[in-house]
Amino acid sequence: MAERLAVDGDELSHFMKLLRTSTESLKGLRRALEDATVTGLGTDDLDCACEDFQDNWKYGADQIGEQTEDLAKIIGKSRDSYREVDKALEQALKKAGDGRGGGTR
């Protein structure tokens, strides 16, 4: 069963980095599009539709960025908790083994 319970802290750290990079990319995209204007593209209806799309895109991109950052924090806490439990388990097993004459029978 132990071989099925495995957490790779380095992989979790890499995943956190990817999530944070994605968040920064979304922020950069929002900054780049922030100054884009939608007026004069065509009819008033088209200009209005483009403005609505830009407002919705901004809201959606902001929400994705916030949730991605939150997920990165949660993964970091999980990684730290797994490491803490792993160390505690290792110490407990070592202590139990030492109490039985070095862990051998």
Image (tube, rainbow, N blue to C red):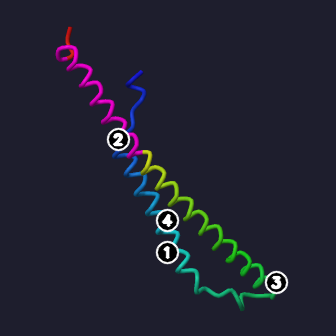
Mark 2 nearby-residue class (10 Å; few <14, some 14–19, many ≥20): some
The image quadrant that residue 52 belongs to is bottom right
Residue at the disc numbered 3? 45
Name which residue lies at 17% across and 14% down.
Answer: 101
- Give above or below for 56 relative to 32: above
Residue type beneath disc 4: Thr
Mark 3 or 2: the one toward you? 2
Residue type for callout 3:
Asp
Which quadrant, please, contains the C terminus? top left
Q: Quadrant of residue 20?
A: bottom left
Circle 4 SS class: helix
Q: Which residues are magenta?
A: 79-102
Give the residue number, with chain letter if any, for mark 1.
28
Cα–Cα gap, marks 3 and 1? 29 Å
Q: Secondary structure at mark 2?
A: helix
| Category of crowding for the residue at label 3, using alpha-carbon neighbours closer than 10 angstroms: few (below 14), some (14–19), many (at least 20) | few
Going from N to C along the chain, the mark reached first, 3 or 2, is 3
Q: Quick check: is 100 in the magenta stretch?
A: yes
Is residue 14 or residue 42 the one in the foreground?
A: 14
Q: Which residue is mark 4?
A: 23
